[in-house]
Image: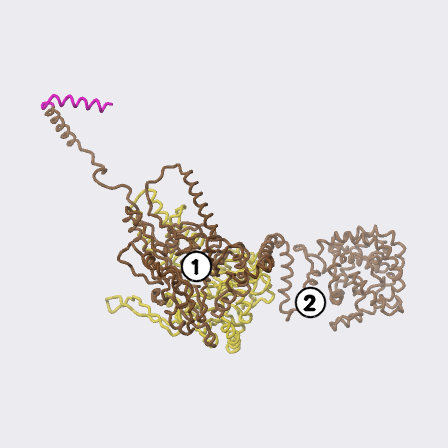
Amino acid sequence: MEVFASPRSEESQEEDEQEKQTDRAWENRQSGEAASPSASQELEPEVADSLKEGGQPGEVALPSSSQDLEPKIADSLEEEKNLAPEPQPSDGTLPQSPGSGGRVSGAHLGEPDAAISPPVTEPRSEGPPRLRPSAPDFAPPTRPEQDIHETSEAGEPRASHSEVSYERQSTPHLPGSEEFPSYFFQQLQDLNQNTSPRKEPVDWGIFHQDESKSSSDLNQSELGLNQKGAPEPAAPSKLEIAAQNAKAYLLKRSSKSGLNLYDHLSKILTRILDERPENVVDIIENISQDVKMAHFNKKLDTLQDEHEVPLAYEIAEKQKTLFLQGNLEGDQEQEDEIAESPLPNIMESAFYFEQAGVGLSTDETYRIFLALKQLTDTQPVHTCRFWGKILGREMNYIVAEVEFREGEDEEEIEEEDMSEESEADEDEKDELPKSSYKGTQMIPKEENRTGANKYVYFVCNEPGRPWVRLPSVTPAQIVIARKIKKFFTGRLDAPITSYPPFPGNESNYLRAQIARISAGTHISPLGFYHFGEGEEEEDEDEEAEGGRDNYEKNPDFEGIRVTDLVESLSNWVHHVQYILRQGRCNWFNPIQKNEDEEAEKEEEEEEEEEEDEVEEKREEPANIEKEVGPPLLTPISEDLDIQNIPPWTAQLSSNLIPQYAIAVLRSNLWLGAYAFSDGKKFENIYMGWGHKYSPDNYVPSLPPLVQKEYPSGTEIMEMDDPTVNEEQAFQVAQEKALFESENIEETEEEEEDDEDEDEDD
Amino acid sequence: MDSESLLLSLELASGSGQGLSPDRRASLLTSLLLVKRDYRYDRVLFWGRILGLVADYYIAQGLGPDQLGERKSLYSLNCMEWSLLPPATEEMVTQTSVVKGRFMGDPSHEYEHVEMQRMTEGDRTYEDEVVIQIKEESRLVSVIDQIDKAVAIIPRGAFFKTPFGPVHVNRTFEGLTLADAKKLTSYFHFTEPIELKNKSLLEKADLDPSLDFLDNLEHDIPKGSWSVQMERGNALVVLRSLLWPGLTFFHAPRTKNHGYIYVGTVLSLDVDSVLSLKFLWMILGHCIAASITFKCAIMYQSLCTMSSCFCFFHSVSIPGGLYSSHGIPPVFKSFLA
């Protein structure tokens, strides 16, 4: 409190000067009535005491206490004072305060001096924060005589001196204090009065000091009092003085924390009265601590909180656009759109999933709903589905599964252009000698709208944030994704550090996992889809390529009873193609194009020993060149067990009301994948970390064995150095041979010479 | 999460996609009230759901006057009839730790575990196969205990310790500030502190004995095993454990709403063995790097075999990154990053 006491006290001084005139007029008015408050005051000690004991301070006690303390409150209480008995009991009625007469007279005397005195009081009023606490210490014990003297003559004025300092002191509180209930101060005051008598001896010291500084400022002090608006110049009792001194003591600030007990108590009480907790007495320590902590926390918070808030606003702002987007379009267009909107009713499916105990809160679902609407409005979407939510470490992904309208895949083309450009760049840069090593042949990724790339996926971190299109998946990414296990971060551009190295960043990994999850867990009731009739002619061709990959809604589907759906898993079929070990849904034969690499290819196939999508049966063909997965629309009852764990758990949503329950299927392979069906409708959803279940802990594949650097053989093996004997023997043999050759033919000699010449060249 | 604010808590924790169906919610609201009366608990927590192959276990916990005192766990299959579980003992935990895989959803189901035991008969010793029967109920007890010890958390200040020892709910708790809510230091393990005693005097100096009487999450092993996210535009902070995927903790900053729920299959990362091998792996990584540098094929080969043996025997996950450019396997970093 006192930290800002001094500046305000200056203000208050200025105010003092300004208000002087008005105050004086007021004083004049009051002077007539002066006795009335004083009277009430004098009566008070008894009244107040009795009230104190009763614990219920009455209104009667108000004037005396508040006037000294809080001029403004005193103002507000003026009326009450005025209501106090008009007939003035004279000063003589106050035997216990000898100086009271002096005080009253002082008040009267002081008035004329008012205009002159303020400058004198001002320096003092600046002092209080310093003066007051030190006053008791400085009280000179060596002035007993003077003390008595002063007491008899000017005791009261001095008391009012102390009041002046009080007022100066307490004025700073005023703005805050005004909020306080008046009776609250009453209580405090009473408290002070209660405790005050003991302080009296010490308190006199204050008067000493005041006296020593300005012994004759009787009027000034009175003036100060009056300026403050204390209406009555009545003589306070010893009790009152003591109370004020007690208050002075309470206002003494701590040398460590700079707080003072008075403010602290008032804060505590304010808080208690505001909050009105039960059993206050039990938690008063906590409140006291909280109040103190709040005092210190503020400083820290200002810096720390600053940057947090805009983020919240930013998201709110973004989501606001979601709610406003409906208004942007004309009515006519809107009607057309409603007729053929690709927007799925995810609130409905959310309702069904809620029956199954899965799903987000209604609020979040609706926001996703709006976000999907935004997506379908901005993209040429043919069908759209809420795929699910993948949890990440920093942020989560909301995934939308989208099929574009025919011939509207502009982005994909752009993307391809981009990739070509980047390749071109690489070629330009690539001046370094290239390795002659040819890696295993890349298996080309599947065309859009087929296989694992049948759908396009959009993700966003939060409804309202922009939707980002995921790149289409390549077989290599799926193959590696099966070998690694990583948590998603929530940032699409985050690198994937893993062994074996993953080709791409998190967006590719996410896309690969989505493809795997879709292939493993997207199921529908038997008969909901059937192979289109138009496809039958092509069947034979496609059969050769690994099965039909197109199906359409069966218009004749009549629904399956829910109990049947729960009891027999053969009533459910996969409607997403199985992904082969190769990483494609449709077998791509690398050998056709590259006969030379056949052997290499086979090796690679063998290396892929990583356990595959276990949930689907796999007939290992004798011919390793061709991988065959189960055809589309295979019943899930044929899914493989995971080490004796059934791959699906089927339950009724409710056993309490089975008539209206729905069938709920939970995948045990991809924890978080659910499907429901009420017999006619069905939906799949995934909510989880994007990890496949495995009963054993994840073990990364080991690094490959070291390759041989060179072929070891006699040709490049280092020979032992010949011994001396060997050398000699060799020399002898050589000479012998030379000798013999010389003897054979002379012509050869010539030839040898030629050779020598050549060697020299 | 507190059973009294169940609906709100479920709503706040729904971001992970796991909730309760309406009939389960309704029955919980009814039955937990009765549990509180019948067992005379001061507070009843809805702990979560363990997904079994056939049925799910719903778990509730009852707390006495001392919030950190013994927690009684109850389970139910239909959210209506609750059965009290025995307290977890160390023996039970070690015994059931051999069981892997999923819960069945039948408390009387018995897992069979074959163990080689050394028998002594007179002078000669021989090894014999002993089949140990482990009831699913005791596995349930130990798993709940494990999860509670590892990842049950509360925000700082939600509970306070009285000088006499008991821990009470702090009724003046007004929630963490937004800045604090993002820090792991503001959250405590809601279990008997272990690390606290090992702290140095210097570290303890700033601690408030009535509030900081538990271990905070800052030094949890492995580092990064908590995902802290702000949801709903900073109005909700959600902590998810990566160690026990399925545990979701929520707290709305500046309110007293907080709680955690576990919905999962009790599949966890096997940290102990991973960590014990972390050091070995670092050494192995260095050696392998050295063997590559010096082109010592035999050394490389044997080291690789060694590492594969480690993997095999401990059936442990050593995340990739062994051959990252740094040479040292940044085991957890790369795993979690």
Q: Where are the magenta residues, as a range?
A: A742-761
The amino acid type, in three-letter code, at marker 2 is: Leu
Q: Position of residue A181 (x, y in %)?
A: 74, 66
At x 20%, y 39%, the residue is A714
Local crowd at mark 2 within 10 Å, few (<14), some, or many (≥20)?
Answer: some
Mark 1 or mark 2: whose residue is earlier in sequence: 2
The residue beneath circle 2 is A273
Q: Position of residue A99 (x, y in %)?
A: 85, 62
Cα distance in 3D space between marks 1 and 2:
52 Å
Colouring used for the render = by chain
The residue beneath circle 1 is A690
> Which chain is displayed in yellow in the rendered image?
B
Label 2 sits on a secondary structure element that is helix
What label sits on residue A115 in the rendered view?
none
Local crowd at mark 1 within 10 Å, few (<14), some, or many (≥20)?
Answer: many
Q: Quadrant of residue A524?
A: bottom left
> Which chain is displayed in brown in the rendered image?
A
